Image: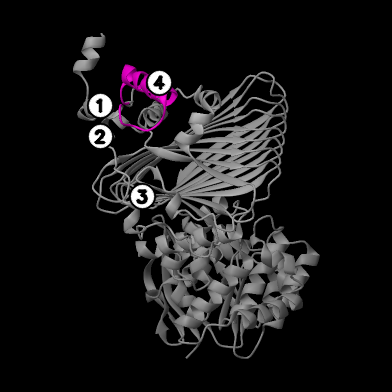
């Protein structure tokens, strides 16, 4: 059986194996990291790239979508100046943390005047000093994409926000890719200590014509009573393959609010595995996807209520034009002792074309008996009667459509607490609609 | 020439003939009431005037201020001064009433080559008109009609009408779903907009709205045609005798 599987290796799988064999000796990190790389790659190799026969990847057949595996990206030449494509986040004043081609670049980062209480450490330096903490953080990572990230991690950063700190300006993790098509595997760890408050922004971008590959992983640990908002903006180049996996633990009474906003890439898979580990945590997870051409964006999430009295709200909105495809797989798990859980999940797709496709798979797995959980899924076109109402008031057809699309996406974006980010994203929705013509 | 001239209008909906040769002329300054039993074609007439797609005009003409109305898109008709107050105003989640009003007013002004209202000018105008109609400021900040009562929705229609200042307002069953107090508020709003320059077509099943919005001319619509036209006393006669006589006449 094993021999047979090896014979059936795809080009991409063969290339991944060859890359790992040749690169593992020079990949950064000490002996502990090397061991976890090896174990992670073995985990990956045992099953290979997931195809549609693997339930979790049913709608995003990575085996078919990933035709080749690019070589590992070289770190950029920091002496040649910053690449101009680092997202400037117009109207948002943030501390920038530059991660280019999968490498954390302190020289291009800007923590000047940073609020006290934030420290940035190179990933491998941190792991060297905190090996057992690292091993604890990644112990549960069985997901295949995360295994690949762990095997190939090219670099990354550990952001630590100290107990009780109030970080006024957002921390902007700016991931960028430049150069010849290659693969980057950044790994970021964000440790928010109890009662701290911070806003994190992640941006991903790269050149339009390049079929580069990104497999990023973010490990989030949110302490008791902390308040964290995270906004991810996916603006990868139009030919890029993007995977990001977030694994998070949310402490007692903590408040975690996130939005993932995707307009870029050819293929994106956003995976989120969140666990409420302390009582009374509050989680809001939102997504807004604006897709055209043949873009494929998959939002897969598992919200694991592992403590009492936690509340979660998931709201996902996809606007699908041309032949684009939006996938949503959301699962709420309520553990036997997680009584008084309150979980609501809603996913909605707006189809602007006959050829667009929406796949929605909401799931509830409830093992406690005193809970309130629900989910809903809709997909459809713009409401003709609403369009007529707007037009009967003098609003031209295109503008009426734009207003309704903005309102549709707005329900996801309006949950962002940071006003500057909210306005910037609203502006990007407008720009997307204008480009649509 | 009348402001609105409808000649021999024939309309089908899903292949079914609803209007079967309707004639109507409305001059500026006049208030016409169109009464008729359910299914006589009242709402169809209202929607055809506003330009709804699903209604297929198979014959006849409609001219507004001398131009062919049927050739225009719904938004172009609105900019020319036609306003339809909906029987069932729609809810628009995510679009605040204030934003909706600003979009509508400025779109119409733009189409007429007039300057858009500046935000302070716009807000001042909306506040004035809302205050006159007893529309709460809080309502303006909420998404259009979402969670509004029937009365609030109808009042919102009249607010839109007051701000857009149409030349011809078509009120489709504005009284439906209103209790007597709400009806009075809405009727007062409409009456305040009566002017020698503005025409109104009030579509209703019941006479009671016409106690409050007193028409100049009353038409009876039955089976897709105007079968009788008279003064305001015709409405009282209909109230007393019902529509039975007209249904027989049309048959």
Residue B128 point in image, percent of width and height: 72, 80
Q: Quick check: B74 above or below A186?
A: below
Residue A35 got which mark? 4
Dot 4 or dot 3, earlier in sequence: 4
Q: Distance between the residues labelled 1 and 2?
A: 7 Å
Q: How crowded is mark 4: few (under 14 residues within 10 Å), some or many (20 or more)?
A: few
Q: Is mark 1 on a helix, strand or loop?
A: helix
Residue A64 appears in view: yes
Tally of numbered tags = 4
Dot 4 or dot 2, earlier in sequence: 4
Q: Which chain carries label 2?
A: A
Dot 1 or dot 2, earlier in sequence: 1
Nearest to viewer (mark 4 / mark 2): 4
Q: How far apart are marks 4 and 1 (CA)?
A: 21 Å
Q: In the image, A348: left or right of A178?
A: right
Q: Which chain carries label 1?
A: A
Residue position for label 2 = A69
Dot 4 or dot 1, earlier in sequence: 1
Q: Quick check: A218 above or below A82?
A: above
Q: How far apart are marks 4 and 2 (CA)?
A: 23 Å
Q: Nearer the viewer, residue A369 or B50?
A: A369
Nearest to viewer (mark 4 / mark 3): 4
Q: How far apart are marks 4 and 3 (CA)?
A: 32 Å
Q: Which chain carries label 3?
A: A
Q: Distance between the residues labelled 2 and 3?
A: 17 Å
Magenta run includes residue A228: no
Q: Give the range drawn in magenta.
A: A25-49
């Amino acid at each position: 059986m094993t021999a047979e599987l090896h014979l059936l290796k795809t080009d991409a799988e063969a290339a991944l194996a060859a890359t790992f064999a040749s690169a593992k000796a020079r990949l950064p990190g000490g002996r502990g990291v090397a061991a976890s790389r090896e174990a992670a790659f073995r985990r990956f190799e045992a099953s290979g790239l997931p195809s549609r026969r693997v339930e979790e990847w049913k709608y995003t057949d990575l085996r078919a979508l990933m035709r080749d595996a690019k070589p590992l990206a070289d770190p950029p030449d920091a002496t040649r100046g910053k690449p101009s494509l680092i997202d400037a986040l117009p109207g948002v004043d943030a501390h920038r943390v530059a991660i280019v081609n999968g490498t954390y670049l302190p020289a291009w980062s800007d923590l000047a005047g940073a609020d006290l209480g934030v420290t940035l450490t190179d990933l491998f330096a941190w792991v060297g000093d905190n090996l057992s903490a690292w091993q604890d953080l990644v112990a549960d990572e069985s997901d295949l994409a995360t295994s690949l990230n762990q095997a190939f991690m090219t670099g990354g950063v550990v952001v630590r926000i100290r107990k009780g700190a109030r970080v006024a300006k957002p921390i902007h993790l700016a991931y960028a890719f430049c150069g010849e098509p290659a693969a980057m595997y950044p790994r970021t760890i964000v440790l928010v200590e109890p009662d701290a408050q911070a806003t994190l922004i992640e941006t991903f971008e790269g050149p339009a014509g390049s079929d580069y590959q990104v497999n990023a992983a973010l490990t989030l640990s949110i302490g008791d009573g902390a308040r964290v908002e995270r906004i991810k903006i996916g603006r990868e180049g139009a030919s890029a393959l993007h995977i990001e996996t977030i694994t998070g633990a949310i402490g007692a009474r903590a408040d975690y609010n996130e939005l993932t906003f995707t307009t870029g890439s050819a293929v994106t898979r956003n995976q989120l595995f969140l666990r409420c580990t302390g009582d009374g945590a509050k989680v809001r997870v939102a997504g807004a996807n604006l897709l055209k051409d043949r873009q494929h964006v998959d939002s897969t999430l598992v919200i694991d209520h592992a403590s009492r009295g936690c509340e979660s709200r998931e709201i996902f909105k996809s606007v699908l034009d041309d032949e684009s495809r939006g996938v949503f797989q959301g699962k709420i798990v309520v553990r036997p002792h997680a009584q008084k859980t309150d979980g609501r999940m809603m996913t909605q797709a707006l189809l602007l074309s006959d050829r667009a496709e929406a796949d929605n798979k909401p799931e509830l797995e409830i093992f406690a008996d005193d809970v309130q959980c629900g989910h809903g899924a809709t997909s459809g076109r713009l409401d003709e009667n609403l369009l007529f109402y707007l037009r009967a008031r003098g609003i031209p057809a295109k503008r009426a459509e734009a207003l309704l699309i903005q309102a549709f996406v707005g329900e996801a974006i309006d949950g962002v607490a940071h006003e500057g980010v909210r306005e910037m994203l609203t502006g990007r929705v407008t720009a997307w609609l204008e480009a649509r013509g | 020439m009348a402001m609105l001239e409808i000649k021999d209008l024939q309309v089908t909906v899903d292949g079914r003939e609803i209007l079967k040769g309707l004639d109507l002329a409305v001059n500026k300054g006049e208030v016409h009431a169109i009464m008729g039993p359910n299914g006589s074609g009242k709402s169809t007439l209202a929607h055809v005037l506003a330009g709804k797609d699903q209604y297929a005009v198979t014959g006849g003409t409609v001219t507004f201020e001398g131009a062919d109305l049927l050739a225009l898109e719904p938004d172009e008709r609105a900019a020319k001064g036609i306003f339809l107050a909906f029987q069932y105003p729609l809810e628009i989640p995510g679009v605040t009433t204030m934003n909706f009003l600003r979009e509508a007013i400025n779109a119409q002004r733009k189409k007429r080559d007039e300057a858009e209202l500046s935000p302070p000018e716009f807000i001042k105008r909306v506040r004035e008109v809302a205050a006159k109609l007893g529309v709460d400021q809080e309502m303006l900040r909420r998404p259009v009609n979402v969670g509004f009562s029937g009365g609030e929705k109808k009042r919102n229609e009249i607010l839109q009408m007051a701000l857009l200042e149409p030349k011809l307002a078509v009120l489709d069953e504005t009284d439906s779903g209103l209790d007597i107090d709400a009806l009075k508020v809405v009727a007062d709003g409409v009456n305040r907009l009566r002017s020698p320059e503005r025409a109104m077509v009030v579509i209703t099943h019941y006479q009671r709205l016409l106690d409050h919005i007193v028409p100049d001319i009353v038409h009876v619509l039955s089976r897709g045609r105007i079968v009788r036209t008279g003064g305001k006393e015709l409405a009282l006669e209909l109230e007393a005798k019902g529509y039975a006589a007209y249904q027989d006449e049309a048959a």
